[in-house]
Image (cartoon, coloured by chain):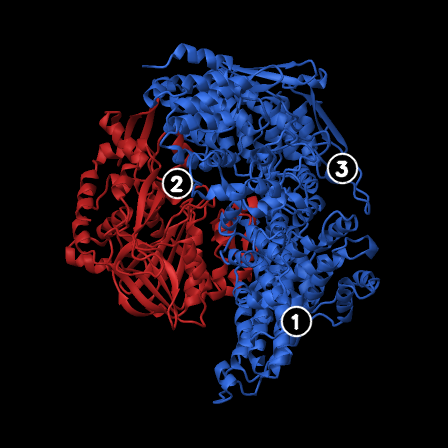
Amino acid sequence: MSAVQSYTYRYPFESALFDTTSEPAMRWATSLDGTSDDLFFDGRLRRPALVGQCLSLLTEIVRTRFHQPANPRLLDPVVTSGGGLLRFEGFSSCCGVYARLDLNPDAFDVELRGKGTTNVDFNNTMRVALRRLDDRHEARLQVGGTGITLTRDGDRIVERQVELPVRWIKGFCEVQAYQVRLTPHFDLTPLEARDLLRTLPKGKTARQPVFLTRMGRALRFAACDQRGAVKIEGTDRLRILAPLVGSSRAITVWYDESSQTNAWDFQFDIGRFIALLSPEVFRGFSGEGQILARLATGNWQDALPGVVDSLQWQSQFDVGRLALQRGVSESAIEAALAVLGARGLVGYDMTTGKYFHRVLPFELDDVERQQPRLLAARKLVANRSVRILHSVGDGWDVEVAGTDVEHFVRLRPEGDRCTCPWFSRNQGQRGPCKHVLAARLTVEGDASATLRELNTIA
Amino acid sequence: MSLDATRLQSLLEQGDSAGCMQFFRGASEPERQGVARQVENWVTFISEVVREENSIRSRGTTEQRAAAQVATLAACSLSSLKKLRWRVGVKTEDDVAVLTDRRPAWLGDFVDHLLDATPPKWMDARRLVRAGLCPPPRHENYVLGMTSLMGGVGSYASDPSENRGRRGSGWNILSHLAAEPDLLELIWRLFELEGSGEMSLAAHDNYCGHTSDQSWSDALVTLMNQGTLPRERLLDASLAALERGFHPYRANWFARFHELLAPTKEELFARQSNYLRLLKSDQAATAAFALRALDQIDKQQSIDSVLLMDSLESVPRFPGKGLVKGALKTLHRIAERDPKARPRVARLAATALSHTAIDVQTAAIAEVARWGTTADSELVNTVTAAKTAVAPSVQSSLADWLASVTGSAAVSAKQLESETNRTLVEISPPPTPEFAVDLLAAKSELERRAKRIPPAWRAVAGVDQALESLNRGDFDFSCCTFTGSEIPRLDPAHRLVPIESWDELVDLASRLVETIDSHDDLERLYDGVSRLCDLRPADFVKRTAPLLRRILQIMERQLILPFADAEPAHSLLGVLLAWLNGDYGTIELRQDEKGRIEGQYTLGDLSRGLYPRRIPLIAQALCERGHELADRILRRCAVATLCAPTHRGGWIEPLELVARASQPRVLAEATDLEQVLALLRLAPEGRDEAARQLPKGEHPFLAALEATLIGGDRDLSPSLPEWLAHASRSARGDKNTRVTTSFRFQPPQREGSALIRLTIEPTPAPPAENLDLRLLPTCRWHLHDLRDWSDSEGVEFVRQQFLVHPVNQTPTIARGALRIATNLDWWQVEWANRHYLDPLIDPDVPLDEIGHLLLTVGLSAKQHGEATLATDIAIAACDDGRLDPSQLGAVLHRLLSARFILAARVARTLGQVARVSAVHEECVRIALSSSLRGDPAAMPRDMHALVEFLSELVIATQTPVDAAAREFLKRLTGSSKLARSARKILAFDRQPDPIRTRTLQMQIVSVRLDRAERWLSRLDPGSR
């Protein structure tokens, strides 16, 4: 099974900065994948330096492997336009950090705003250009367009072959499941954040966990856990955000105690920059398997068609209204949206607590085909390796064949358990093991057919 | 027609490279592919590592490997070559010749594959390019590989001469570039690519560039001087590289290189806009570089003030004070020459007020006062916002400046600049004083709470003493003086639930086999296995097969072998194997010719060699306990363990222990060590009731238990449990007791001795002035001696020690103090050491002299985790009244005067403690004040950091230092930072504010009441 998906970004030209008579203009090429309008966005930046800083940081994150530093991969962030917002999303090359820049209408004087999602070419020249933006000069931003002639290269198509790791794409789907569970824990002033980030450990010590906690009048990274503390591992991933502190209005720290995922939300006048950090530095969001159970089975199947019909590049889904319109419960709509998130068809914005529509410009069928645990579970079911022993209250005892041994799976409302090493090691923190999935598939049925239909609709 | 496989095999075995080349010459692709698999298998075979008596080598000879290399390149497809990974390269001219003859279509991809390797095979790729077999690849590593330490330009590996590697061979970067001038074009790409790890200009010059002929920067300057590389382009390229946002480590090389080129005045002027952009960099070093360049320009020909101030805007956010002070100087220069720029200079200077360095704050407020006007509303707001961030010593200057604002008019920045439309602004009101509380009401509430607590508990918790001080209007920061053995330790919320079912047992065992994340759970597991080991359901083998398989996997892959080491994981596997497998294997130890001990572990077909290491005595004892448990399980003797804790932290409830001791079978099966542990783990509360229920009997343990429960001096028989029962009661007293016993498990290198000594004896306290590290753990009663030392310790090993004798953690704490102290500068990686600090976070573990010692070495440790945990403990101990500032000061004095710790590190960690609250601030002030004793000349050179910090505390707390500290400070004369700070402290002679003193004392009373109430709630959960 290939761990990379050979993917060709096809750009109509190379992104570049060029000076017109009055102002520098950045023209970003978008990939020709049919998920977006042609000329995507055209506007004048109101805070060029800040936008430049945020975008350089985003590209820096996308090019970094925090777990095992190595040569950066040539990955480009994904941009979504819709509902008045321009969103840039990306993952670090190790998939342990999800970063998103939301630019609100105050960020631009807009002349043209298209809708859709696509990759943006962030080449070396563009990264340097972003760093050079300053507020003394106006700057114009154009995203997309095919009929543009550049003085240098004409209008040739620029193709860039990228070995896109499947985990990078899977991360986009997995991260939605985490965002839903995050709640705000701390609000920091820029000064507090600045002092705090300066105390972060460096080097190998950065891999040790620290706990953000308030002690008296001081906010600090403690070495031991305390009630209400936010656990952070791999603090190099946090220190990289320090340049944003000076420009931000406020910083909110979000945390989910059960998964130990944390998010840092830097708020500006023109939008926000969000960085979501995985629980441990060696754990990318892609391998977590939080969506597996949902992909395999679930009660969302009735609500799904209605939700899919309503996808119109909204920047926020109104779940209540949709539930009323479709005559289903809000929880069913939420579950359906979660599944769509897992399929790359919607994103989740934790700051508003709502989903937004975007279609990831990747081959998502391949992604699902490369969910190893789900595939293995289906194989176990197909091979008749699952045997239901008996029901216990609201649960079931199931026997699933493993390598040379039979694993004993207990399906219970309070949490499933298995005797395999994966489960013993992770205790369900990183999604169900293949044996639990196989047992669930056998007991509750497989939702793969519905998902295949969903692909066709999407 | 096919190639002769037999002849090929013969050539390969002979190691005949020339024959192989001849064999493949002119062969077609299908013919080559016909023997490809054979060659592939041969290469894999001869590359295998074989172990001989005294060495490890690959199976094939050098000649065989060379011939195989030729054959591989001649026969295999690209995918096969990729599969063979490190085994294949283009090492010799023969390899190049064979590819020249073959000229495969995939050669370009093969070169990319060579460059993709870690580390990239740059030399191999270069050989192919040099031979003209492929064009220069576009791969980044083809450029970056030039800087490779192992095989890049000018490296020893690339030397083609026979003198390779010899001194004076003359091979270096310049000679390499001269020999291969086509590489010169690639040099410009080195300014565009960042590189990583060991492949960058910075890494090369850092590790290899110690001599001028080996450094890239010197080589490039030489090439420039020779006229080979244009100077202008080098200057521009280095500046462009700095704008690419490389990692500071790599970016700094370009800044240094640019400065090495020593740009002239004209060259600097021409690049002024680049420097201005670089001054806005996110990286301090780049900004500092740009500021240096701009200062040079500005001093010769003034730069436009607006442009310069635009670029300086972001500088105050950098943490380094040198850069920010430099920026303030530049701003000062701008203001002096350009009156219009003054308002903005003041505003920019004001942003530096929130810098953490006091020097910077002082310089910033001076600029604000000089150039700012109180009519500037933006400036006033910035200064007001910085009020909470500035140091106490700067606050008066800041307040003075702000005071001049009151009543005056202020205008917005833009208005000021245009000098029109003046408007009034609101000045923020001063913050409410921290101590402005209703003192009387609060005091009555404290007294009311105190009355509800029994006098005995009030006394132990120090409530009465603190209340008396409050009534007198004094401030008493002495710590609570409980020992931990007189207070209730059993928290009902921390009761451990014994394992009842077989499923639960398997689940817990499966989890702990992966990682021992809780020693309480490990104890639960041992107890569960011990009680349930005779339960054998019909599907026992089937249900436990996954766990057993996993255990065997771990043994094989991670070399964790039962009872082969002191780490708890080894014992755990042994116990589980005894339960699941009915056999935990055997270890045979033998001595080799050189006297080294080797061992062989055997279990069925599994056989592994092992090398026993020195392990601490206590670990051997705990390992032995697992061994004994495993033996009992092998006999299927299902019985409760006498020493199983009933509460978290290793505690056993006395009544529960009595209940266990009442079962003759439990007593009969309990080993000596289990009896010892049971007594050591006994909780202090409920002993009287337990003593009443204690059965009568002949077993020595019952007598020992009675002695432990009732106490008093008794004439005990010399059995181990009895001795330890006696010792555990007197561990904190002054009795001199020696306990010796024997255990089975002993490595034979101890010359037949079968003794493990658990020694409890007093040893001399370390001398006050000359600290001898070896004496660190022996300040008080201890269970370990200095021979009890191991090379490295795992986290689990450290944690398990805390469960041995919960009421007396001092021996383990002493051990931790020694281990952290001997690795204070983190000269070797010892991640587990910080866990020795763990028990001190518990508010019921007293901080005695050894505790303060461990805390102090932790506070001065270089390693971030150790220092942060020690800071957490200091904050918590100050909060709950365990920290004695005078004692902390005394330990600090001892370590500082021995120059054992760095004052700056302590100042930093204690600074974090002081930030928490006014009580913490006061506590740190007293500790620092108490540390200033004796001869200042004996103190470390960075003592100014500590004294400067103390001077800020004195101003912040409005409380002077004590007389002894004043004497110390008076001896500091001169104009050094240290002396200046000392004078600042001495100048402060005001009396403490009585309201503040009372408020702080009330907080202390409140904390002590909290403690007493918590103890009460343990005895009577409904009391709270």
Q: Out of A145 and B738, give the one closest to the viewer.
A: A145
Classify A214 as above or below A260.
below
Classify B709 as above or below A196.
above
Tell me the residue that label 2 is attached to.
Answer: A429
Classify A356 as above or below B482.
below
Tell me the residue that label 3 is attached to.
Answer: B774
Dot 3: element? helix
Q: Out of B459 and A401, give the one closest to the viewer.
A: A401
Estimate the x, y position of residue B514 in percent, counting from the top left: 46, 31
N-term-proximal mark, 1 vs 3: 1
User: Hey, what amino acid is under mark 2?
Assistant: Gln
Q: Which mark is residue B735?
A: none
Is any part of residue A409 visible from this angle?
A: yes
Marks 1 and 3, Cα distance to the nearest angstrom? 47 Å
Marks 2 and 1, Cα distance to the nearest angstrom? 52 Å
The chain in red: A
Is any part of residue B42 visible from this angle?
A: no
The chain in blue: B
Tell me if mark 1 has few (under 14), some (14-19) or many (20+) residues whose alpha carbon lies within 10 angstroms of its own: some
Tell me the residue that label 1 is attached to.
Answer: B363
Dot 1: element? helix
User: Hey, what amino acid is under mark 1?
Assistant: Ala
Tag 2 near tag 1, CB within 8 Å = no
